[in-house]
Every structure is written in structure tokens, then in C-alpha cells.
Amino acid sequence: SHVDVRELHPKDRHPLIFDHLGRLQPGEKITLLNDHDPAPLRYQLDGMFPGQYGWEYVEQGPDRWAVDITSKVRTIDARPVIAAGGEPRETIMAAAALTEPGEVLVVLAPFEPVPLQGALGALGFDHVTDQVDESTWRVIFSRR
């Protein structure tokens, strides 16, 4: 799908783009149309979501820029399942099985999921963990 932000006020562009990116499945892409080189967005994506999006220029100015942004991420938000008293492990393990080399699996949890890190580590995944806020841990798993 195309996301044309050329007519939008600059402050409205990134929220719209992030909304579209958040709905992509691995391998799906959006084509971003912009009136300038969107390199700052690329730096923001690389900083906030390392390794989770591919970036390929299709058209490079001077008045119109087009970039294909491809999702390489599969996200499982375990917080609602855990809050409801459920166990998200089966869902997470199924998502891990579908995660190809070059893609990443992101798990959001209300605590650091140490047992999960060990289980996926045994299946050949490396991980990077950070605490996003008081109630959210983010673990980024990638195949070795």
C-alpha cells in the first residue's frame, strides 16, 4: 500500500507512518511517498526498532521521494493474555517457529520473560531485552 504524506503537516506524518508500519506482517511493505528524503525517519526506525524494517529507495527526489519499507518483525503482545490469567507460551513458540532468518520476533511482556529467553535460546535465537516502561518489557529475538 502507498502512504502519501506529502500533503500532511510535518507533525502528523510520523504518527501516520508508524500506524501503518504497526499493522504489517513479516514480508509486507508500504511505499512511503514524501516531498523530501525521509532519512530522519530511517534513523528513528533503526533506533526504536533495530533490525525490524527493510528500507529501499524507489525514487530519490528532487521533489518526490518514494521508499519501500518492509516489515521484518512478528510481534506478540503477551500483556493482555497474562493480565487475563492466560499463558502465552504456545502462541509465542508458534510465532518463533514461523520466524525466518533475517526476521525478528518481538515479545512484549509485563515482566522480563527469563524462562522464554532460555527456551528460545535453546532453539537458536539470540535476544536483546529492554524495559520500555514500568509495565512493559520488550524482548527482540533473532535467529543465530
Image (cartoon, rainbow, N blue to C red):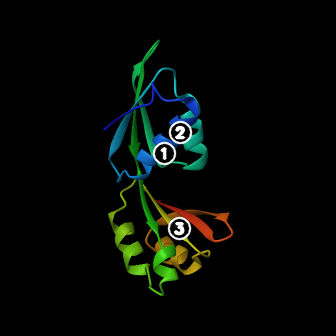
Q: Are marks 2 and 1 in contact (CB under 8 Å)?
A: yes
Residue lying at 48% horizontally and 87% vertically, measured from the top left: 85
Q: List the single residue furthest toward the top.
A: 62
Real-space Cα distance between discs 1 and 3?
Answer: 17 Å
Query: Looking at the image, which is closer to me, 51 or 40?
Result: 40
Q: Position of residue 76 (x, y in %)?
A: 44, 67
- Residue type of the residue flagged with mark 2: His
Disc with the residue nearer the chain's start (3 vs 2): 2
Q: Determine the residue located farthest toward the bottom in the rendered image.
A: 85
Determine the residue positioned at 59% across, 77% down. 114
Q: Residue at x 46, y 40 (%)?
A: 17
Q: Amino acid at mark 1?
A: Phe
Q: Position of residue 111 (x, y in %)?
A: 61, 76
Name the residue carrying label 3: 108
The three-letter amino acid code for the residue at tag 3 is Leu
Q: Position of residue 51 (x, y in %)?
A: 50, 48
Would you say 116 lies left or right of 93 here?
Answer: right
Q: CA distance from mark 3 to mark 2?
A: 22 Å
Within-10-Å neighbours for mark 3: few <14, some 14–19, many 20+: many
Label 1 sits on residue: 18
What residue is pinned by disc 2?
14
Q: Badge 1: few (under 14), some or many (20 or more) residues near its Cα, within 10 Å?
A: few
Q: Earlier in the sequence, mark 1 or mark 3?
A: 1
Taking depth in this image into account, of 108 and 84 the one nearest to the observer is: 84
Tell me if residue 49 comes above or below residue 39 in the rendering: below
